[in-house]
Image (cartoon, rainbow, N blue to C red):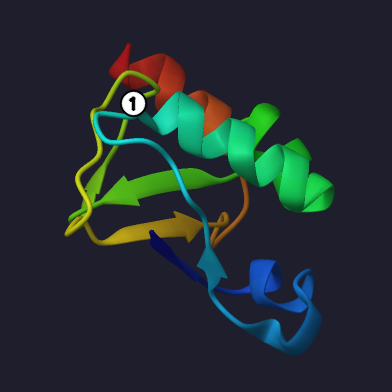
Amino acid sequence: MKIKLFGMLKTMIPGGKDLEVVISEGGQVRDLVHSIQIEHPQVGELLDKKKVLISVNQEIAHWDTVLKEADEIALLPPFAGGSCETWAQEKG
């Protein structure tokens, strides 16, 4: 599964490339995060602390969102101050 990176996240990956992660069919965003935490601990730490939003098909995803091979996934760092945690709390 290809994961697009933006902003500071690109600088955290050698070569500034997008990520490739393998998860099983029917896997959820939580499985994706777990794979990233293992392969790229710095990025995984930001995901765990909710400093980065996960977008699936251009919509903010939740931990239980089921992923499909054709999904467009992106990791979005904060663009202008604040943190994703506040946004997540507001969205419930």
Identify which residue, 91 or 6, lies in the foreground.
6
Q: Judging from the image, what secondary structure is the residue with disc 1 in?
A: loop
Q: Is residue 51 visible?
A: no
Location of residue 85 in the rendering, given as x and y in whole percent from the top left corner: 56, 26
Q: Quadrant of residue 10?
A: bottom right
Q: Residue furthest bottom?
A: 15
Q: Position of residue 18 (x, y in %)?
A: 54, 75
- Extreme-top residue of the structure: 92
Image label count? 1
Q: Quadrant of the C terminus?
A: top left
Say above or below: 59 vs 90: below
Residue at image position (49%, 38%) is 32
Residue that appears at 48% across and 57% down: 76
**Is residue 79 left or right of 55 when viewed as pictured?**
right
Residue 58 lies, in percent from the top left, at 20, 57
Q: Which residue is mark 1?
A: 62
**In which quadrant of the rendered view does residue 34 lie?**
top right
- The residue type indicated by label 1 comes to His
Which quarter shows the N terminus?
Answer: bottom left
Instruction: Indicate left or right for 52 with 24 as reference.
Output: right
| Image side of residue 17 versus residue 37, left or right | left
User: Whole-percent x and y of residue 86?
Assistant: 51, 26
| Residue at image coords 74%, 88% | 15
Q: Is residue 2 above or below residue 54?
A: below
Asked if residue 74 can be seen in this view, the reply is yes
Badge 1 density bin: few <14, some 14–19, many ≥20, Cα 10 Å: some
The reply, left or right, for residue 57 in relation to residue 9 is left
- Determine the residue positioned at 22% across, 53% down: 69
